[in-house]
Image (cartoon, rainbow, N blue to C red):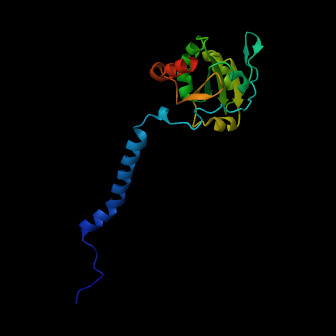
Amino acid sequence: MSDQSSPAPPQRRTFLMVLPLIAFLALALLFWFRLGSGDISRIPSALIGRPAPQTVLPPLSGLQDNGAPVPGLDPAAFKGKVTLVNVWASWCVPCHDEAPLLTELAKDKRFQLAGVNYKDAADNARRFLGRYGNPFSHVGVDANGRASIEWGVYGVPETFVVGREGTIVYKLVGPITPQNLKTVLMPELAKALK
């Protein structure tokens, strides 16, 4: 009579131990190719074609331009003007990289730049703008992040193009870079300016 409780052969035991690792690696590769290789800046926004959120944000306290306080963000300021709305924070590393590009963009008077300072300390935000220069005509403070949720922000930095009618026409997820400024953002601004 044979013993039914004999252990499995060593090869089979090794295979059973390695099987979860193989399954994990297969899933990791699948996620990598489906998510990791895509362009994050092309994540669609449900707000494209819709009015910009009507949330009024208070100004960044103590921020001045030529001795006058810089106003907060009021959606009424979008009417009749093409506006680039940039969501940023002093603690955001990519925001430091894109700051010089925003300063250059501010020289183009065909549109206005507005900033949403996201979950930041006022002192740090003012130091950030003092270091790089303030490209924004309006800076609204989103201390608790609720306004950014209304804008559909995934994380900072993000930039929106708002048309003259106050409608969001484009959203760039991630930092502005020399490459996407030239190939994506400026063409989207040009369309909005027509």
Q: Residue 35 location, x and y as percent?
A: 43, 42
Label tally:
0
Work out whether 101 lies above or below 54. Answer: above
Asked where in the image residue 63 lies, by quadrant, the reply is top right
Residue 91 appears left or right of 14: right
Quadrant in which the N terminus is drawn: bottom left
Work out whether 17 lies above or below 143. Answer: below
The foreground one among 120 and 176 is 176
Residue 9 appears left or right of 190: left
Please indicate, yes or no, whether residue 158 appears anywhere in the rendered image. no
Q: Residue 51 location, x and y as percent?
A: 65, 31
Q: Residue 114 location, x and y as percent?
A: 65, 22
Residue 70 appears left or right of 152: right
Residue 186 appears left or right of 28: right
Work out whether 194 lies above or below 33. Answer: above
Asked where in the image residue 18 lies, by quadrant, the reply is bottom left
Q: Residue furthest bottom?
A: 1
Picture residue at 76% right of the left edge, 23% below the top: 61
Quadrant in which the C terminus is drawn: top right
Please indicate, yes or no, whether residue 1 appears anywhere in the rendered image. yes
Picture residue at 53% right of the left edge, 17% below the top: 190
Picture residue at 64% right of the left edge, 38% below the top: 149
Picture residue at 32% right of the left edge, 65% below the top: 16
The foreground one among 19 and 75 is 75
The foreground one among 152 and 68 is 152
The foreground one among 65 and 163 is 163
Q: Residue 71 location, x and y as percent?
A: 74, 20
